[in-house]
Amino acid sequence: MKQTLQLKVTQHLTLTPQLQQSIRLLQLSTLELNAEVERILQENPLLEREESDDDDAPQEGQLSSLVTAPATSERSTADDDGDGDGDALAGVDSAPTRDDLPDVTDFADYGGGDNDWGAASNNEDDDFAPQQAATSTLREHLLGQLALLKLPLRDRQIVAALIDALDDDGYLAASLDEIAELFSEDDALEPEELTIGLKYLQSLEPGGVGARDPAECLALQLQALPENTPYRAAALHTVEGHLPLLAARDFTKLRRILRCDEACVKGVHELIRSLNPRPGASFSRDEANYVVPDVVVRKVRNQWQASLNEAAMPKLRLNRIYADILTRNRDASNQQLSAQLQEAKWLIRNVQQRFDTILRVAQAIVERQRRFFEYGEVAMRPMVLREIAAMLDLHESTISRVTTQKYMLTPRGTFELKYFFGSHVATDTGGAASATAIRALIKQLVAAEDTGSPLTDSRIAALLGEQGILVARRTIAKYREALSIPPVNMRKAL
């Protein structure tokens, strides 16, 4: 075979360093972008921040209005295609766990609902007193009480070991045998000593601390109440042996067991609802996660328009001193500075291109979801990444990068751009309804239902069918579960 030379012309995409940086910056969140820019500022002397004039600086309160907490947007983790081929809801466990307790005890009803601290004060100066965050942890709070008890040193050590074994909710995470193993052989503990130490721990505040399960936690709080408290004995009998019935809201069977009337069962239910199943939660120091929105949406002359948030944009410029030196001296000794000058130009251009792309995508979303800004979630229309990509002549992967961890501040709250995308469900007219809109309708139907006879998933599906939205019962169950709405038997009230 004879060897020959041939010329072949082909086209291919090369990921240059500039293109790689552009893609990487596009997928970063605002906080990550600022961290990346700060790192480059430390390494590149040719780059510096542009100092803004005092007149252009945001006034006090203006910037704080742009730094907000993201609105809660229930995104279904289940199959949203509406074909009803997803998994069915899991059944109710025979015995409740701490995660199941919100169905029994509404955390918004601690203290019976109308709390004294929420009432208006007679002193006008105290009307707007700020609420102070917890200044001590649960461990510090309990050790402070332990220091006031007149106990022998050995008993103090035992109670302190029990305190160290508590979890964030105030429950004893380890068994007594496991705690006994923490002590050396020379300080071996007797079972009676640990039991006495646990009694000391459970006598401390907050009530219910040191419990080993939810039933014991509620029982400790009931035992601390005065004996003449209405329904105290019946409530104590319920939490000690029949808490699963109350969790399942099987009031008929509970009434037969307690041998009392409906008013007594209702009183027991309300008394248990007033207890705190997580006594240590008030000492947690969890802080809200705040985000800086990249885009702000406003209605201007009856038109919804998106604009960039200036507070989220890093303002960069070239260092003119170094740039002038490189302009006058273009010898080989300045090759490193020349490379840094080029990198600085790339960064400035890529940062600007990043925000331009975000603005284009945000404005396209606003145009497609205009009815959402007017009427809310029930007017959300189905939309996929492919639609926006076709509108802007961009690739779907670019739209995916732009909508991830980028936020939009609207009159209805702060939302991630990805929130406006979702699957759809067919209607009887041949159209489509957004999964977000269907979840909003389910939430409205449940909020307006009769608590004595709540709506079943089949009934909700039938009501949506009357509105022209064809949704399977199992799809309703998935959406309801995604909204943290309990099943029908858990929503029934006396």
Image: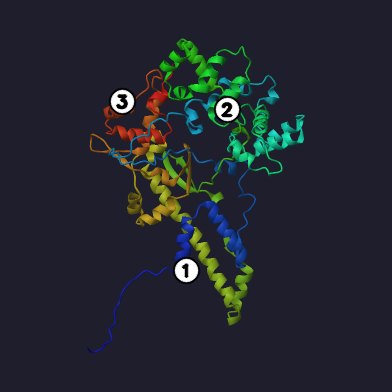
Q: Residues within 10 Å of mark 3 (few under 14, many from 20)?
A: few
Q: Quadrant of residue 286?
A: top right
Amino acid type, label 3: Arg
Q: Position of residue 392 (x, y in %)?
A: 36, 54
Amino acid type, label 1: Pro
Residue farthest along the bottom direction in this orientation: 2
Image position of 308 (left or right of 374) = right
Query: Between marks 2 and 1, how big is the CA–CA gap?
Result: 60 Å
Q: Nearer the viewer's eye, disc 2 or disc 1? A: 2
Residue with the mark numbered 3: 459
Q: Secondary structure at mark 2?
A: helix
In primary-sequence order, the first of circles 3 and 1 is 1
User: Which residue occupies 36% across, 34% down?
Assistant: 89
Q: Nearer the viewer's eye, disc 2 or disc 3? A: 2
Q: Position of residue 349 (x, y in %)?
A: 50, 63
Residue with the mark numbered 1: 17
Query: Considering only vertical position in the picture, is 37 above or below 422?
Result: below
Q: Residues within 10 Å of mark 2 (few under 14, many from 20)?
A: many
